[in-house]
């Protein structure tokens, strides 16, 4: 896609309330993205959680962790809603990091988004960092909000590393993916931007214990929110993988109008198990084509460096 068109899109993407839809609490890249937004986006209006935990993992644990993280950053003004609960997941490692004083969060996704729509004019930026369950629910129960949504979604793949299955976020709720694509095809919502796995699942965005950002977050006398991120990272490294790739912060950067990812218009079809394929008669969307990882990681470091001042704090 031509660079001038990217800039045009970027300018429009910078305006409007920001909603983050996240399965925070597993891979630490969600928490890193939420923290970056909380520290530097005064228009952050709502955090929704998806793939919520139930049973032994603690009902609504992802939402409670998001609430705790926001509180530590000083963003008590941003509400958190515990959204869709899917099948039990092993990708959860923050249960012991949430104080008992953090109560269960509200569970009415539709009411929360409608409240944002009623009080914040103009476009509503929606950043999807998990399955599309909450977005599909909103399309079904609050269709009047759909035309205002400007969706940037981490998910989908044209060349997924496991060809026999769909990309993770699409695989978790295939029915929701079909609901969203039907709304796009019907003209009920603008075509989203999909930041696909080929662009995000790369070593260029890895953070491990030897990464400068990890060292900055774990330095002596850092604020409580930074220590919380480090604790989360440590649990992810010990229990799942020795690094985390920044799928979700890269997706956030697109919604904020940063120029790190280039897109191309593309018609996509979604099969019965959630795999996406370019097809002439597919649904027109915008698909990530390339990324400037060095510039992106520099941007992310700046926004999460505890020594730096958050932007726009006077508006919180």
Image (cartoon, helix red, strand yellow):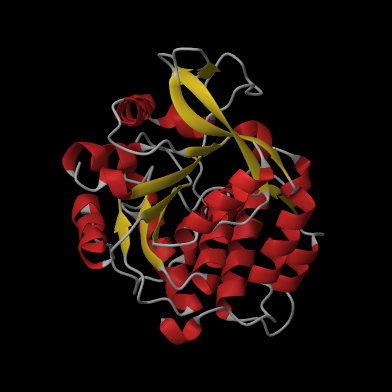
Q: In the drawing, does residue 244 fall left or right of residue 170?
A: right
Q: Of all residues shown, which one is farthest toward the front?
A: 4
Residue 178 drawn at (x, y percent): 35, 24
| Residue 230 appears in the picture as rendered | yes
Residue 242 drawn at (x, y percent): 73, 47
Picture quarter containing residue 241? top right
The residue shown at (75%, 62%) is: 298
Q: Quadrant of the N terminus?
A: top right
In depth, the one of 34 and 254 nearer the eye is: 254
In depth, the one of 272 and 183 nearer the eye is: 183
Q: In the drawing, does residue 127 fall left or right of residue 139?
A: right
The residue shown at (49%, 61%) is: 14
**Above or below 199: residue 177:** above
| Residue 28 appears in the picture as rendered | no
Q: Quadrant of the C terminus?
A: bottom left
The residue shown at (35%, 55%) is: 123
Residue 106 drawn at (x, y percent): 24, 60
Residue 6 drawn at (x, y percent): 61, 46
């Amino acid at each position: 896609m031509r660079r001038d068109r990217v800039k045009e899109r970027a300018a429009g993407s910078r305006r409007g309330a920001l909603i983050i839809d996240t399965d925070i609490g597993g891979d630490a890249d969600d928490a890193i993205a939420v923290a970056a937004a909380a520290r530097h986006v005064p228009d952050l209006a709502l955090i929704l959680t998806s793939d919520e935990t139930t049973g032994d993992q603690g009902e609504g644990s992802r939402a409670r962790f998001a609430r705790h993280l926001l509180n530590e950053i000083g963003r008590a003004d941003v509400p958190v809603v515990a959204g869709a609960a899917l099948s039990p997941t092993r990708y959860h490692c923050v249960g012991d990091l949430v104080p008992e004083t953090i109560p269960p969060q509200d569970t009415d996704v539709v009411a929360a988004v409608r409240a944002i729509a009623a009080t914040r004019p103009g476009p509503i930026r929606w950043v999807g960092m998990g399955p599309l369950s909450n977005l599909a629910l909103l399309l079904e129960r609050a269709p009047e909000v759909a035309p205002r949504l400007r969706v940037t979604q981490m998910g989908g793949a044209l060349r997924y590393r496991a060809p026999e299955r769909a990309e993770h976020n699409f695989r978790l709720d295939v029915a929701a993916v079909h609901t969203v694509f039907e709304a796009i095809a019907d003209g009920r919502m603008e075509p989203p931007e999909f930041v696909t796995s080929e662009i995000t699942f790369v070593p260029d965005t890895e953070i491990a214990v030897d990464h400068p950002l990890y060292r900055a977050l774990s330095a002596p006398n850092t604020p409580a929110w930074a220590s919380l991120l480090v604790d989360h990272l440590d649990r992810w490294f010990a229990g799942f993988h020795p690094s985390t790739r920044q799928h979700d912060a890269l997706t956030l950067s697109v919604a904020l109008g940063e120029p790190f990812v280039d897109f191309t218009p593309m018609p996509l079809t979604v099969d019965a198990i959630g795999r996406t394929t370019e097809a002439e008669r597919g649904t027109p969307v915008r698909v990530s084509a390339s990324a400037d990882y060095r510039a992106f990681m520099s941007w992310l470091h700046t926004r999460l460096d505890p020594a730096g001042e958050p932007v726009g704090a006077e508006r919180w």
